[in-house]
Structures are given as structure tokens and as C-alpha cells.
């Protein structure tokens, strides 16, 4: 059909997403499933009307300036858009969308896993049993930290933060939060609002980060802020690696200031921080917060919904 639009998909999206995309568009699928280079993004902008990139494809101001006028929409397969220079893309008249809502539960589930794993020393316990080195038991052995009744601080009470709070309520945690604005009572569900971050940190036996990566949140958790948390607290990050000063985190683990950390995101990705490997108190996963079958399909479908709306002349639901 003459008016079928062409879209470029640089990463391996779910089978259901690819099937729907191929049904409705001319799809150019990258041959290899790896981050696209700047040159590839620029080259593909001359061949495609729209793109479905992931957070691994970086649309810097320099890339945005070089994009071909054929490209009209960047329909991200991610909720985070820190990989996109939004003002630069807007200046080129390119619409940018993301995939909010649909990954909140999967990400909150992973944050719960990381929090539990860090609290109950999952890395150490797994290593002991798996390696055959488990030759001792005592009431003093592998003692961890209990969630029940503990105070949980949530930084960023957006969709993921609220989904995480819902799950933490099931563990009878006392929920505190810091957010740009206070939520209404319906959304707050008894959570205690802190108008400033330092006040939240002081009561956070566990702290979980759910805010976007922006220049303002860069290394939000630095040595000074970590020092405000109760001794023996646990830090969880499923948002973006840039929110945490990794040298400060490592120092806090080594000094015992923090009892542990649960991390799905790192300053350097892929790869993570090799220095963390020496610390079994740090429970880690490789940026897989939204990696469930259901959520991957939902993210792909949400990106396609945004493309469909745009090419039908309507405002995409998730236009930024
Ligand atoms: C997101 O959607 O931002 C996740 O980090 C996966 O890209």
C-alpha cells in the first residue's frame, strides 16, 4: 500500500510487538540486537518515518541536529527518556513518546526482589549453598534485616513509586515518601509525605529510588545524603544509575554505614560496576526491571499505539 509508513526497530522487541508492527507498517529491523550507534540512528532517519528505540539508543543534541526531516516520531520503548535530548528533538519538530504505566508493576516487583535480597543476604546465602561451602548453622548465622514494621522511604511517588508502595504495604512496612508535590489521600493511602529529601532520608530504614534521571537528580544519593540515613539502612535503585554516586555507595557498604544495596541500574551500562562484585551485601541485576513477557508486550503495544495515533493525525497519548 502506498501510504504504509516505514518504521525502524533497532532492538529485538517481543514477538507479539514485531508481528503487530509488521502487520501495520513497513518494518526495518536491525540485523543485530545491540545498541544502535549515532551514525546508524542518523542514517536510518532518512529511511524511516518513525522509530521505536529503547533507552540504549542515545538521541543527543548532536544526533538530533543531524536527523533527516523524514523522521517524524521517536516512539520510545521505555518510560525513561534520559537518553533523548527532548528540547533538541522538539526543535527539529520530532514528536517523542514513552511507555508509562505498563511497566510499573514489573519494575516494582523487581525492586521488591532487590530489597528482600539485600535485606536477607541473598547473594551470600546462594553462594554458600551453591558452592557446597555451607558447613555451619547457628542462631547467629546469616542474620539479616526484617522488612515487617520497618520504615520504607520512597523517592519519587509517580506510577512506579506508588506500585512499589502498594507491594510494600503487603509486607506491613511503614511508607514514607518524598515527591515534588504531595499526593491526594486516595493515592497516598496513609503514606507519610516529607517536603524535603533530607527529612525522608533520616527515617528510611530502606530507601527506594523511583524518580527520573535529570540534571537535578544526578548523584542525588551522594556521601552526604547517604550519611543522613539510619546506620544499617538498605538502598534500592531500579530507576537510573546516575541517581547514585557509586564510589560513595561502595564506601558506605565498606564502612557498614549501609547494610546493603539492591541495584538494577548502574552508571555504566551494560557492564555495571566491577568494584561492587567484591561485596556480597550488594544484590544486583542487569537492568531488567521491566523484563517480563507481559510487560515487554505491553511496552511494545504502547509504543505502537503512540505511532498509530500519530500517523492517524491524532495526538499520541504519551507525547512528551
Ligand atoms: C525504562 O522503561 O525506562 C526501563 O528502564 C527500560 O528501558
Image (cartoon, rainbow, N blue to C red):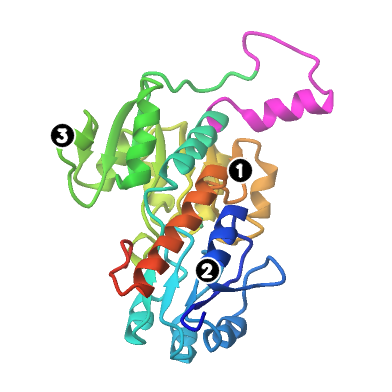
Picture residue at 44% right of the left edge, 62% below the top: 303
In the rendered image of this protein, does residue 56 appear above or below residue 184? Answer: below
- Mark 2 and mark 3: span between their CA atoms? 37 Å
Write down the quadrant of residue 36 in the picture: bottom right
Picture residue at 41% right of the left edge, 41% below the top: 208
Q: Is residue 214 visible?
A: yes
Do labels 3 and 1 touch, CB within 8 Å? no
Residue 4 located left or right of residue 286 = left
Picture residue at 59% right of the left edge, 40% below the top: 282
| Residue bearing mark 2 | 53
| Residue bearing mark 3 | 185
Q: Is residue 121 magenta?
A: yes
Residue 240 tag number: none
Going from N to C along the chain, the mark reached first, 2 or 3, is 2
Position of residue 147 measured from the top left corner of the image (x, y, whole percent): 44, 23
- Mark 1 and mark 2: span between their CA atoms? 25 Å
Within 10 Å of disc 1 (Cα), the crowding (few <14, some 14-19, many 20+) is: many
Numbered disc in front, either 3 or 1 = 3
The magenta-colored residue range is: 118-141
Going from N to C along the chain, the mark reached first, 1 or 2, is 2
| Residue bearing mark 1 | 284
Within 10 Å of disc 2 (Cα), the crowding (few <14, some 14-19, many 20+) is: many
Amino acid at each position: 500500500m502506498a501510504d504504509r509508513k516505514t518504521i525502524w526497530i533497532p532492538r529485538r522487541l517481543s514477538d507479539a510487538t514485531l508481528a503487530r508492527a509488521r502487520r501495520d507498517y513497513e518494518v526495518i529491523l536491525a540485523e543485530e540486537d545491540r545498541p544502535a550507534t549515532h551514525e546508524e540512528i542518523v542514517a536510518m532517519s532518512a529511511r524511516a518515518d518513525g522509530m521505536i528505540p529503547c533507552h540504549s539508543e542515545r538521541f543527543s543534541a548532536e544526533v538530533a541536529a543531524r536527523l533527516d526531516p523524514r523522521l517524524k516520531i521517536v516512539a520510545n520503548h521505555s518510560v525513561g527518556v534520559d537518553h533523548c535530548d527532548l528540547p533538541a528533538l522538539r526543535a527539529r519538530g520530532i514528536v517523542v513518546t514513552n511507555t508509562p504505566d505498563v511497566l510499573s508493576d514489573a519494575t516494582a516487583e523487581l525492586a521488591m526482589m532487590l530489597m528482600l535480597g539485600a535485606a536477607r543476604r541473598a547473594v551470600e546465602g546462594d553462594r554458600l549453598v551453591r558452592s557446597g561451602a555451607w558447613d555451619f548453622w547457628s542462631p547467629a548465622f546469616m542474620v539479616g534485616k526484617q522488612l515487617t514494621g520497618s520504615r520504607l522511604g520512597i523517592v519519587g511517588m509517580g506510577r512506579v513509586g506508588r506500585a512499589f508502595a502498594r507491594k510494600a504495604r503487603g509486607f506491613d512496612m511503614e511508607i514514607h515518601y518524598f515527591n515534588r508535590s504531595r499526593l491526594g489521600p486516595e493515592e497516598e493511602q496513609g503514606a507519610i509525605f516529607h517536603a524535603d529529601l533530607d527529612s525522608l532520608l533520616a527515617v528510611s530504614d530502606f530507601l527506594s529510588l523511583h524518580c527520573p534521571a535529570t540534571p537535578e537528580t544526578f548523584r542525588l544519593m551522594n556521601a552526604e545524603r547517604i550519611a543522613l540515613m539510619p546506620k544499617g539502612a538498605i538502598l534500592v535503585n531500579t530507576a537510573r544509575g546516575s541517581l547514585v554516586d557509586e564510589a560513595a555507595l561502595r564506601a558506605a557498604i565498606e564502612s557498614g554505614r549501609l547494610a546493603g544495596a539492591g541495584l538494577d541500574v548502574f552508571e555504566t551500562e551494560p557492564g555495571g560496576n566491577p568494584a561492587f562484585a567484591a561485596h556480597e551485601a550488594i544484590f544486583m541485576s542487569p537492568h531488567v526491571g521491566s523484563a517480563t513477557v507481559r510487560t515487554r508486550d505491553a511496552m511494545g503495544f504502547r509504543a505502537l499505539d503512540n505511532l498509530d495515533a500519530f500517523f492517524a493525525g491524532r495526538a499520541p497519548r504519551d507525547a512528551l
